[in-house]
Amino acid sequence: MREDIEKALAEIRPKLQADGGDVELVDVDDGGVVKVKLTGACGGCPMAQMTLKQGIEKILKEKVPAVDHVESVP
């Protein structure tokens, strides 16, 4: 599953990088919880939570059905 998540993040990454940010995969557990770290401009952006839930999580769930939810870690 981790490899599939990395592939999906690679598709998302250029959009984040265009705004000066990025996303890094930190951990994936057996329950489908994906932990990511938003970096660069995304790390301190007031819209980061919306980007995480309505962008990253939505796409990951579409591409990798085993994903339950995505959490941001510091």
Image: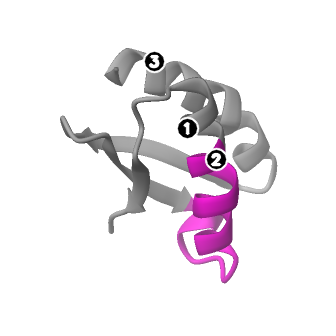
Residue furthest to the left in view is: 30
Q: Which residues are magenta?
A: 40-58
Circle 2 residue: 58
N-terminal label among 3 and 2: 3
Image quadrant where one finds the C terminus = bottom left
Which residue is pictured at 68% across the width and 26% down the height?
11
Mark 3 element type:
helix
User: Colour scheme of this structure image?
Assistant: one colour
Which is nearer the eye, 46 or 32?
A: 32
State the separation of the CA atoms marked 3 and 1: 11 Å
Mark 2 element type:
helix
> Magenta stretch mostly in which secondary structure?
helix
Q: Residues within 10 Å of mark 2 (few under 14, many from 20)?
A: some
- Residue 46 image offset from top left, x and y in percent: 66, 83
Quadrant position of residue 3: top left
State which mark lies toward you, 3 or 2: 2
N-terminal label among 3 and 1: 3
Q: Is residue 20 left or right of residue 30?
A: right
Q: Amino acid at mark 1?
A: Lys
Which residue is pictured at 65% across the width and 76% down the height?
45
Asked if disc 1 and disc 2 are in contact, CB closer than 8 Å, the reply is: yes
Quadrant position of residue 54: bottom right
Circle 3 residue: 4
Which residue is pictured at 39% across the width and 60% down the height?
71
Which residue is pictured at 49% across the width and 29% down the height?
65
Quadrant position of residue 61: top right
State the separation of the CA atoms marked 1 and 2: 5 Å
Circle 1 residue: 61
Q: Residues within 10 Å of mark 1 (few under 14, many from 20)?
A: some
Mark 1 element type:
helix
